Image (cartoon, helix red, strand yellow):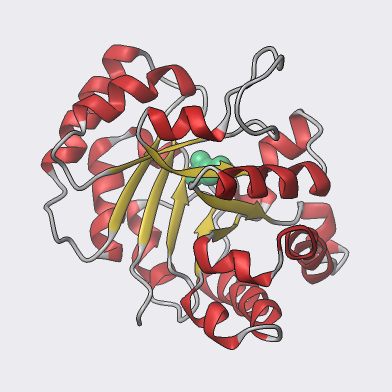
Amino acid sequence: MTRKPLIAGNWKMHGSLADSRALVDALRAGVTAGAPATMLLCPPYVYLPAVNGWLQGSAVAVGAQDIADKPGTGAYTGEVSGQMLREVGCSHVIVGHSERRALYGETDVVVATKFKAAQAAGLVPIACVGETLEQREAAQTRSVVERQVEAIVEAAGVQAFAKAVIAYEPVWAIGTGRTATPEQAQEVHAFIRGMIGKRDATIAAGLSILYGGSVKGANARSLFAMADIDGGLVGGASLVAAEFLEIFRAAA
Ligand code: PGA
């Protein structure tokens, strides 16, 4: 496989500065330069400069959990722009996480705008898509994921996926301990790759598609063994160094 696995930790709104320090120290000790997978840490905004500083000289990358849908600077109280994220060392940013969509009302259009804002600032967006349990049970998984991906393709063009990552995160698997089976995840990953592939086969072949939703050390290997699963977006288990390192090693 030509796609280098990416293991991203989404800390969400967890931990303290001291917790973050301990976690970063333990993780960086477990990741060697030249490892066959990339580790990415996405702490809360306010910890980004500190985490980036602690990771100097390591192979671990830093990303943000969200981004303003506006570029540059401006009168947008509470928002953080892509340029600002770059300044504090971010290479990636998560956009459209299901918690942002469900709890903060982010629509497909907002997510696509954030995706474009990330790329305009030189960040790699990790665009999250995925269906709720209700939607899965109503056999709408494909149509929901298709709508979410299409919104971005329409706004940014398929070429934009040459420098982007997609994360398939079934909402029913996030933080529930209920992981999609490798086969369930693979089916959707292949569907997403096929969607992009219909427009550009080369971009589809190079596109990293991460799985997220209750990834643990114990299930990581079987997920990552699937042909179209290129790593993971990990919430809860990314807060426990030993667990996250086990997931990282499963990809590497
Ligand atoms: P989880 O979260 O690993 O705790 O299920 C994943 C995510 O929300 O990205």
Residue 24 x, y percent position in the rendering: 23, 30
**In the rendered view, would you say 8 is above or below 65?**
below
Q: Is residue 71 left or right of residue 1?
A: right
Residue at 61% across, 51% down: 173
Q: Which of the image's four quarters has the C terminus?
A: bottom left
**What residue lies at 78% left-to-right and 66% top-to-bottom?**
141
Is residue 11 in sight in this rendering?
Answer: no
Give the x, y percent position of residue 223. Answer: 44, 68
The residue shown at (62%, 44%) is 95
Residue 153 image position (x, y, % from top left) = 74, 65
Residue 241 image point, x, y percent: 25, 37
Judge whether 33 appears above or below 44 on screen: below
The answer to whether residue 166 is left or right of residue 69 is left
Q: Quadrant of the N terminus?
A: bottom left
Decide which of 242, 199 is in the foreground and name it: 199
Count of numbered marks:
0
Instruction: Answer whether residue 70 is visible to the viewer in this image.
Output: yes
